[in-house]
Image (cartoon, rainbow, N blue to C red):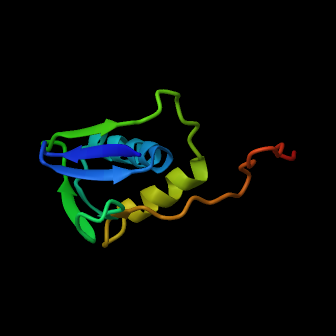
Amino acid sequence: MGILTYDSSLVARIDDRPLAHLQAVVWAKIRRGESFAFSWVDETGEYARASVWINPSISLSFQYDDAAPIQLNQEWLRALTKAANSATGLRLVDEPDHGRATVGEQKKN
């Protein structure tokens, strides 16, 4: 379970794989100077749901349990980016499995 820390005070605990995808989308939007809303469900039970406004002036950190790099799913990045660009803002959507091999399977050409 990874950790996203917002403005040194609010903490979101999110599994490493989805967190890596969220980080890629967040960094891309921040690099472009774009602000947006981000909402998530708290899996630890401290609160039910949280929303924050992300902009380039707010500090963010991403911490991971596993040091191994995570291969990013381009379809998932597109889906998350679409959510981030919507009126409701970025939220974690399910990972599409199109073209992604599961454990023990080979990707078919």
Q: Residue at x 71, y 58 (%)?
A: 98
State the quadrant of the C terminus.
Answer: top right
- In the image, 89 versus 13, the foreground residue is 13
Quarter holding residue 43:
bottom left
Q: Is residue 43 above or below residue 16?
A: below
Q: Is residue 44 above or below residue 68?
A: below
Location of residue 6 in the rendering, given as x and y in whole percent from the top left corner: 19, 47
Tell me the residue at 58%/47% (across/down). 74
Locate residue 97, reporting x and y percent: 67, 57
Residue at image coords 12%, 47%: 9
Q: Looking at the image, which residue sits at the far top? A: 67
Eyeballing the image, is 98 above or below 4?
A: below
Question: Residue placed farthest to the right in the image?
Answer: 109
Q: Residue 102 placed where, x, y %?
A: 74, 49
Above or below, 42 against 5 in this view is below
Q: In front: 81, or 101?
A: 101
Q: Quadrant of residue 23?
A: top left
Measuring 38% from the left and 63% from the top, which residue is drawn there? Answer: 91
